[in-house]
Image (cartoon, rainbow, N blue to C red):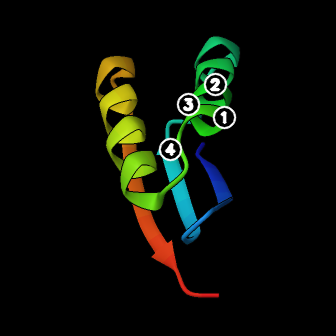
Amino acid sequence: MELGLQLLMRDGAAHVIFHPRLNADQYAELTRIVDLVTTRAALKAAVESAAKRWNVECKFEEVGI
């Protein structure tokens, strides 16, 4: 099963998909990441780094608004 999220940053929206979906601790860390970053580039770097630590696949797409 996977987890897909639409996130709105200051410079636009992003769609992030994690496979398999995140556990409660990973999701909590993700919410902290989202609170700290402000741009899609920073979000992408932070999310991809976290996904690597968590050993999950991460697909990141910028979404036009």
* Contact between labelled residues 1 and 2, with CB atoms less than 8 Å apart: yes
54 sits left or right of 39 in the view? left
Label 4 sits on what residue type?
Answer: Phe
- Circle 4: element type: strand
- Report the residue that reaches farthest toward the bottom: 65
**Mark 1 — residue?**
35
Label 3 sits on what residue type?
Answer: Ile
* Contact between labelled residues 3 and 2, with CB atoms less than 8 Å apart: yes
Picture coordinates of residue 9, whole percent (x, y): 61, 60
Q: Residue at horizontal 46%, vertical 73%?
A: 62
Residue 56, quarter of the rendered image? top left
**Mark 4 — residue?**
18
Q: Nearer the viewer, mark 2 or mark 4?
A: 2
CA distance for labels 2 and 1: 5 Å
Relative height, residue 34 to residue 65 (above, below): above
Q: Residue at horizontal 36%, vertical 57%?
A: 41
Q: Earlier in the sequence, mark 1 or mark 4?
A: 4
